[in-house]
Image (cartoon, rainbow, N blue to C red):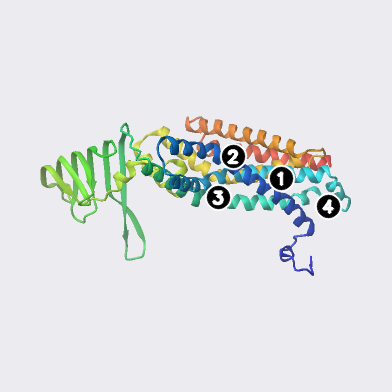
Amino acid sequence: MKNKEGNWYAAIPGFTIMDRYITVELLLPFLFGMGLFTSLALSIGTVFDLVRRVTESGLPMLIALQILVLKLPGFIVLAFPMSMLLAALMAYSRLASDSELIALQSIGVQIYRMVVPGLILSLLVTGITFLVSDWVAPAANYQATVSLEKAVNQDNPNFTERNIIYPEYGKVHHPDGNEETYLSRLFYADQFDGKKMQGLTILDLSQKGVNQIVSAESATWNIADNRWDFYNGTIYLIAPDGSYQNIVHFAHQQLELPRNPIDFSSRGKDYGEMSIKEAKDYLKIVKLSGNEKKIRKLEVRIQEKIALPFICLVFGLIGMGLGLRPKNNNRATSFGICVGLIFAHYLASFLTSSMGIWGILPPVIAAWLPNILGLVAGTLLLIQSSRLN
C-alpha cells in the first residue's frame, strides 16, 4: 500500500489503513489498562505497607519512594496481560457494537484478517513482558528488599538455615581448545544463624597435587581481615593417592576461602528476585540438598517464569474472541468480564501450581496448563465468533 503522506505504517509490508485503525483502537484501552492495573496493584501490594513503615518504623520518605520505584517493574509485568485482555475486549467490542465489523465484512474482509493487528500486538507485548520479567523486575525487586532491610535495620533473630550445601566449580582449558568443568570446592554446614556457621565440612580440590578437608565446629566471616575464622577443627591434607599427608588440629585458624557460602546463606533471593538463569543455577545447588519439595517448587517457579509472558497472547486471543461476538458490550461490561477472566485464570494457575509443588502434576504441566487451556478457549471463541458474524 502506498501512502503519499509518508505515514509510518506504509513502511510495513501488508500493513493497511484497517490495521492502523484497529491498532489505535487497541492501544488506547491498553495504555489505560496499564495505568489502572499498575496503580491498583502497586497501591495494594506496596504503598500501604510502605506508608505503615514510614509512620510506625521510621522509614525515611526518600527510601520509601526509592523502594516504590524499584517495585514498579514487578507490578508492570502483572499489568501487561491484564491490559492486553482489556484492550482486546474493549476494542473489538466497540467495533462489533458500532457495526464496523459488518461494514468490513461487506467489503470482503474476513474475521481472521481483522484479528491480525491484535495478534501482532499480543506477541509484541509478550516479548516486552519477557524482557521486563526476566531482566528488570528480579534485580529491582531484590534491590528493593535489600534497601528496605538496611533502612529499617531488619535483623531476624529467629533466622536459621539448615543443611547448607554450596558447590564451587572451576574450568580447565585443554590444549585442543575444549573446556571442562570440575568441582573445586564443596561447602557443607549443619546450620547458619545469620552470623555463625556450625558443623562445617569443606572439601577443597582447588590446589593441584594437594586436596584438603577442613572440619570445624563453627566458623564466622572476619570482615576486617577478609577471611574465615574457623574454631575447634581439623585440617586433613590428602595426597593424590588418597593417603594422609598431614593432620592439623586447631582451636582457631584463619583460612583464605571465598565468602560465597555465607552470602548464599545470609538472605537467599526469593523466587521473584531471580532471573531464569539464576533460578536454574540455584536449582543445581538445591538438588544437592535432596529436599524434594523444595526442588519441585523451584522447578515449578522456573516454568512459571517462562510461561508468564505468554499469558498476554492467551488473554489477547480470549479478549478478541469475546469482543467479536455480535452483541452490544459497553465499557463497564468489558471491564467486568475482564476482571472475571483474570480471577479465573489466576485461580487456575494457583491450583495447578500447588499440584505441581505437591508432585501431583509435573512442573511443566503445572505451569503451562492454564495457558494451554486459555489458548484452546481463545481459539474456539474466535472460531465461534467467525461463524456468528
* Element assignment for label 2: helix
Q: Nearer the viewer, residue 312 or 146?
A: 146
* Local crowd size for mark 1, using a 10 Å CA cut-off: few (<14), some (14–19), many (≥20): many
Residue picked out by circle 1: 88
Please give the name of the residue rendered at 27% of the width and 43% of the height, measured from the top-left corner: 187
User: Which of pointers 1 and 3 lies earlier in the amino acid sequence?
Assistant: 1
Q: Nearer the viewer, residue 132 or 166?
A: 132
With 230 as the anchor, is 110 left or right in this view?
Answer: right
With 20 as the anchor, is 225 left or right in this view?
Answer: left
* Local crowd size for mark 4, using a 10 Å CA cut-off: few (<14), some (14–19), many (≥20): some
* Element assignment for label 1: helix
* Element assignment for label 4: loop
Mark number displayed over residue 109: 4
Callout 2 amino acid: Leu
Q: Position of residue 76 (x, y in %)?
A: 56, 46
**Distance between the alpha carbons at the discs numbered 1 and 3:** 20 Å
Callout 4 amino acid: Val
User: Which of pointers 1 and 2 lies earlier in the amino acid sequence?
Assistant: 2
* Element assignment for label 3: helix
Tell me the quarter of the picture where residue 201 sits: top left
User: Which of pointers 3 and 4 lies earlier in the amino acid sequence?
Assistant: 4
Q: Nearer the viewer, residue 26 or 288?
A: 26
- Which quarter shows the C terminus? top right
Q: Residue furthest right?
A: 106
Callout 1 amino acid: Ala
Discs 3/4, front = 3
With 270 as the anchor, is 116 left or right in this view?
Answer: right
* Local crowd size for mark 3, using a 10 Å CA cut-off: few (<14), some (14–19), many (≥20): some
Discs 1/3, front = 1
Residue picked out by circle 3: 130
